[in-house]
Amino acid sequence: MPETQLKVKLLAMTPHALAVIYAACRQCYSAERAEEIFVRAIQGIPPVHEQEAFVRKIVASGHESVIEHVSFTFAISGISRACSHQLVRHRIASYSQQSQRYVKAENFHYIIPPTIANQPELKRIYEETMAELQQKYNAIVAKLEEAGVKGEKARQDARFILPNACETRIVVTMNCRSLLNFFALRCCERAQWEIRALANEMLRLCKEKLPAVFAEAGPKCKKLGYCPEGKRSCGRMPLKERVIPLQKGKDKPVGSV
């Protein structure tokens, strides 16, 4: 019943992603057919660097509907059930998650929060608790099966005692616009540590594959130029009230002279 680590694998993405976005953008302003623009874009007409520059400009301007035509599919493992509950709140996405009903947790892996892993006594208590829960789970499954409740019916009830720390595995597909929103929220220093680590790894893969869209992606403060979190700010960026002039007739930010 070992501790496990985060792993993110990019399974697939929309083929010719840059050309798809470029053709979608150009279609809005061109009498040509999108497929003609697309074929030329694949052939390097205009050159790829010009396509990238054009898409970067579109993304920077906030016209993000065109990037919804491209999606990324990730295989994610080594995250806790607690993390997956946060992940699936991002609703414009598709999820296929490992079931605790169909997959027996006879030797479940788990995640240890860093604050606990860094303190030997707390880690010992944590690991002992995981081991005890494993034993209780196994015992409940065995007793249910002895009583004639077999297979998934036994597992679906025994899983009620499994902890949020249990590892889960999930396949996630998001379009580029949803990914930008996901990164803006979950790469923030105020996001919970586990989903922030997941978001940062997904962002790394996206930047590598499609920099025209994701080169400037990250926490929302990066695009805004200020932190909208007020007193909860991590301090990386100036607070909103020091960048945006105050209302009520005042025309200077706080702290200005």
Image: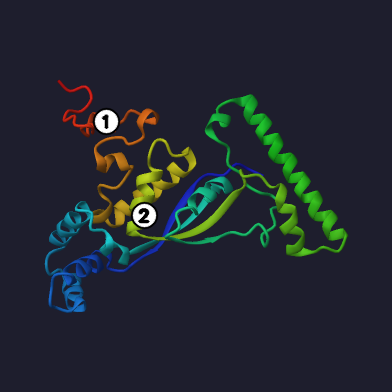
Identify the image quadrant of the N terminus: top right
Question: What crowding class fits label 2: few (fewer than 14 Cα within 10 Å), some (14-19), or many (20 or more)?
Answer: many
Taking 65 as reference, is 121 left or right? right
* Foreground disc of the pair 2, 1: 1
Instruction: Tell me the amino acid under the disc marked 1.
Output: Glu
Instruction: Name the mark on residue 179.
Output: 2
**Helix, strand, or loop for circle 2?**
helix
User: How far from the left and from the top, in percent, is residue 79?
Assistant: 53, 47
* Count of numbered tags: 2
Q: Is residue 194 above or below residue 181?
A: above
Its colouring scheme is rainbow
In the image, is 140 to the left or to the right of 25? right
Does residue 78 appear in this view?
A: no
The circle on residue 241 is: 1
SS under mark 1: helix
Q: Is residue 252 above or below residue 173?
A: above
Does 186 sit left or right of 158 as displayed? Answer: left
Quadrant into which the C terminus falls = top left
**Is 255 in front, or is 53?**
255
The picture places residue 22, in percent across and down from the top left corner, at 20, 66
In the image, what residue occupies the spot 66% across and 49% down? 108
Residue type at tag 2: Leu
- Which residue is drawn at the image coordinates 26% and 64% (left, top)? 66
Confirm or deny contact between disc 2 and disc 1 (CB under 8 A): no
Where residue 130 sits, quadrant-wise, is top right
Q: Nearer the viewer, residue 112 or 33?
A: 33
Q: Is residue 116 visible?
A: yes
Q: Earlier in the sequence, mark 2 or mark 1?
A: 2
Quarter where residue 69 is shown: bottom left
- Residue 129 position within the rendered picture, expressed as x and y whole percent measured from the top left: 70, 36
